[in-house]
Amino acid sequence: MADICKRSDDYSRWYQDVIAQAELAEASPVRGCMVIRPNGYAIWESMQRQLDDRFKELGHVNAYFPLLIPKSFLAKEAEHVEGFAKECAIVTHTRLRSVVKDGKPSVEPDPASKLEEELIIRPTSETVIWNQYRKWIMSYRDLPILINQWANVMRWEMRTRLFLRTTEFLWQEGHTAHATAAEALEETLQMLECYRWFAEDIMAMPVIVGKKTERERFAGAQETFSIEAMMQDNKALQAGTSHDLGQNFAKAFDVKFQNAEGSQDYVWASSWGVSTRLIGGLIMCHSDDKGLVLPPKVAQRKVVIVPIWRKDEEKEMVVAKAAELRDMLKPVAGLVHIDDRDKMRPGWKYGEWERKGIPIRIELGPRDIAEDVCVLATRHDGEKITVPLAELTQAVEANLERIQSDLFAAALERRTKNTHKLDTWDEFTQLYKNEGGFAYCHHCGDRDCEESIQNETKVTIRNIPLTAEAEEGTCIKCGKPSHKRVLFAQSY
RNA sequence: CGGGGCGUGGCGCAGCCCGGUAGCGCACCUGCUUUGGGAGCAGGGGGUCGGAGGUUCGAAUCCUCUCGCCCCGACCA
């Protein structure tokens, strides 16, 4: 039981096994949609809370815009339609009627309820939001507007994978409006940095921060920036994006303001988002063949106590002691769970909490209590140490910090080991024929050249790192001159 | 949508080729003994084999269609 495929045998099978065994999510009756189970949702809540706090610190407020968008809205920004039209779900009727089909009772859309203007289920909310902004913005005094919304969106993708790409997903989308291009860009970069912070400091997932090429840009954006993380199969995962929208949406939705000098100008915009895809990244970044591994800062339950007993009297005593420890640990570990389920032996419980990724497990039995100690086991490295109860709080606190930094260090080391600087097409194709990874290479910047690389190798330019230094070279593919290296990888 | 694989109690599978109306492991329920790394014994409940049609005295097994899932591609956060 509890079989998790080894990463080395079949990575994507392993990924699915981890999700199933940790009870994070499962498929739904509708293809491509997922049911996020409590363990998975707890991760999302934890991410949501921390991001939301940060957004607010940076001056943003939350609002909510509707799920349904008039079809015509999507047609207002040319590139935007181009980008999303293929994957929009459309509402055409407002009610069903009962019918008998092949002798069986059934339902079908009532033809009488057909909508005059069909509605789109939002794939993203720029259009509805900008339609409202037109009403809210008159003067430069109304700017900036810094709104975020937590919502679900739908993109009818051909192929889905739990968390990484589902037809419906949860995300946050920030939509800001500014009086100047510089301010919009500043906001775009500020939120990009916020995402870097979240990925690295909270998720312990190192990322490369950079600018997307024209080809990979968000439909309707002037510039798109992303954070890219390396998964354990050496593929890249785009973990968050921040877009400088320029005046594209303001022009499409006619959002003008009067500036201090009295003249009219279109508003400058940014939008940025991260989604439940982050959970997929979290899994693929840290988990192992035993199951999920959660960084303490993301884990809702950071510590579980497994009491051990033989007789009922022992159970009472051990569980009471466990409750004491739980209360004692609250300031450093938050809510601590005591697994006092009967009918399950300790070994079983250890396995279960390992599959579920709880960072620290405390084992507490009569022998420990007699000696005023307990056993502290850390999930990520499997180490077990005996800790005097008097020192437990500090030990837990120190270990939570250690786990967090160990995970980041391990992920960074793995990325470093699998990152290369390549200068020849031969090395490039060899790398991606074999182990893959990140490759910093020169590229001419030509869209067709970029496309031909993808067609031949499935490798794309993930981004142009913000830290890329000027360096003369020649394009890895076509040999034309290049002035800096860009980040290549196969991606999810 | 193209290529490959697979649908049999909750989960994982066997049976299918050589038709005779279902079996194993785990899980579940009851009881007793257990409990420091996935406990043991005994008893027990649950499926008509993804769906539809066909061949046949008889179909999980053969044929046709269909739906769904997984993997590999094209599309994408």
Image (tube, helix red, strand yellow):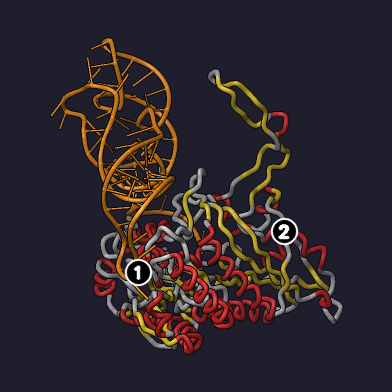
Question: Where in the figure is residue A418, as x and y percent of width and height?
Answer: 32, 77
Q: Image quadrant for the C terminus of chain A?
A: bottom left
For label 2, count other residues whose C-alpha is less than 10 Å away and answer few (under 14), some (14-19) or many (20+): some
Identify the residue at horizontal 74%, vertical 71% (top origin).
A267
**Does A34 sit above or below residue A281?**
above
User: Which numbered disc flags the more N-terminal residue, 2 or 1?
Assistant: 2
Identify the residue at horizontal 62%, vertical 44% (top origin).
A90
Disc 1: which residue: A288
For label 1, count other residues whose C-alpha is less than 10 Å away and answer few (under 14), some (14-19) or many (20+): many
Question: Where in the figure is residue A287, as x and y percent of width and height?
Answer: 38, 69
**Does A24 sit above or below residue A288?**
above
Distance between mark 2 and mark 1 Cα atoms? 39 Å
Q: Give the label, 2 or 1, closer to the camera.
A: 1
B43 sits to left or right of A283:
left
Question: Where in the figure is residue A327, as x and y percent of width and height?
Answer: 57, 78
Q: Nearer the viewer, residue A274 or A279?
A: A279
